[in-house]
Amino acid sequence: MAKMWDGRFSTSTHVLMEQFNSSIQVDKRLVFHDIKGSVAHVKMLCRIGLLTVQEKNDLIEGLKAVEEDFKNGGVVLTDALEDIHMAVETFLTEKVGDVGKKLHTGRSRNDQVALDMRFFTKDAVEETKALVKDLIEELLAISKVSIDVIMPGFTHLQKAQPIRLSYHLMAYIEKFKRDYHRLDDALARMDESPLGVGAFAGVNYPSDRFFIQEELGFAGVCMNGMDAVSDRDYLLEVMSAFAIVMTHLSRLAEEIIIWSSNDFSYISVGDDFSTGSSIMPQKKNPDAAELIRGKTGRVTGQLMTLLTVMKGLPLAYNKDMQEDKEAFFDSLDTTQMSLKVMTEMLKTTTFNQEKMLQATKDGFLNATDLADYLVSKGLPFREAHKVVGSLVKACIDAGTDLESLSKGVYEAHDIEVNDALYKVLKIENCVESKVSYGGTSKGSVLHMIEQIDLWLGLELIKA
């Protein structure tokens, strides 16, 4: 197949070079954004007098026919077509004749590709934001019905202090809310149209770039043509946000894996998001969560791929940048699928409230509260810390807990044993005593839930 750019070449492209150079099996998913960009470009060319009204109408009609062919699966894509941009133009010219050869007036593949990727990525980010919001809504729904469920809180994977399950889940909501805003911030910075800058230096026509920007719904235009075609920092920013989303998903997945283990048994993931063993009949494995955890490395790796591709490129465009799409699309697809799976898996998950509460009864989770009680009696905190540490050691030696430790041991440390002491040591009171803003008391968690409800309502209005 003759190439649209082969005028200065004396031999045809080697079949290996065609295969190596082609990106059409990757970038074909840009086809509908490419066609929309071309329609806007055609309208602009007519607007500035480079196309007649009839030529404009013929080209737009032809582009719509090509779009229908793609929707109906009536196209065959080969390596000889190189990429989706050349494919659309080739199919268009086959439909409308020589007028199709006017489509590329005043643009280069460089600004065409840059437009398609920004245009596609804008939509992809909006879709991903919606999936993050879906997950936040599911975590919030669980939090609302779990407000009175008490469980151990951990540091270093060691039991530390008792908390509410809702409080634990609200921590993830905060992380995913920041992820949502990171994606929103990236969207604001990419929202500029590069079309009309040509290869990089501009074009010799009075192109109305602002008309194209408005036609396609961009907030502005890229100011410098060389910058417009030569960077993919907006993809790096979005992929970085994806990697952080996946990191948060992975942490939640890790806890689902741990909590569903026999030794914890805090939760049970639904059978529809679990798998069995090929040899051990009793097994029920949290494979959905494990796959999310594993795929996090894949998304992080794709970010590193594109960072490495871009790190040494001189201005302006270089063919290396063709490698952006495979890395970005894989990162996008993996992140979106992981968000969907996590949200649906949580809908099937049940929480063992009794087991969680029982788990707070060992591990001395009320030790900090005892230290604070001694502070309220006038003891400096460091001395109180040391005294309670000594009491914990006495409990370990005696095989008991702080609530059951003998009266004599407490009195040996100058601590009066009375109802106030035992009230402080009660796990439910330890949880409720955390009255500082952002703590795990019921009032504090209810306030968090209220704030997230408000935030979700505001985001719904904005959308």
Image (tube, grey):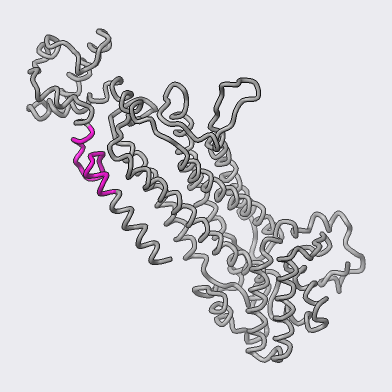
Q: Residue furthest right?
A: 11
Q: Which residue is depicted at the point 33% across and 24% down? A: 359
Looking at the picture, tell me which residue is in the foreground, 348 or 335.
Answer: 348
- Residue 94: x and y in percent read 83, 76
Examine the structure image and report whether residue 358 is included in the region drawn in magenta: no
Position of 123 compared to 177: left or right?
right
User: Residue 87: which quarter of the image?
Assistant: bottom right
Position of 436 compared to 208: left or right?
left
- Residue 360: x and y in percent read 30, 25
Position of 404 compared to 305: left or right?
left
Looking at the picture, tell me which residue is in the foreground, 344 or 263.
Answer: 344
Q: Which residue is depicted at the point 23% across and 33% down? A: 431
User: Residue 123: which quarter of the image?
Assistant: bottom right
Q: Which residue is depicted at the point 79% across and 65% down? A: 75
Residue 259 position (above or below residue 335): above
| Total numbered labels | 0
Looking at the picture, tell me which residue is in the foreground, 265 or 293.
Answer: 265
Position of 419 compared to 133: left or right?
left
Examine the structure image and report whether residue 439 is included in the region drawn in magenta: yes
- Residue 358: x and y in percent read 31, 23
Looking at the picture, tell me which residue is in the foreground, 43 or 426.
Answer: 426
Q: In which quarter of the image is the C terminus?
A: bottom left
The magenta stretch is 431-448
- Residue 316: x and y in percent read 65, 66
Q: Which residue is depicted at the point 84% across and 69% down? A: 3
Residue 97 position (above or below residue 316): below
Q: Quadrant of the N terminus?
A: bottom right
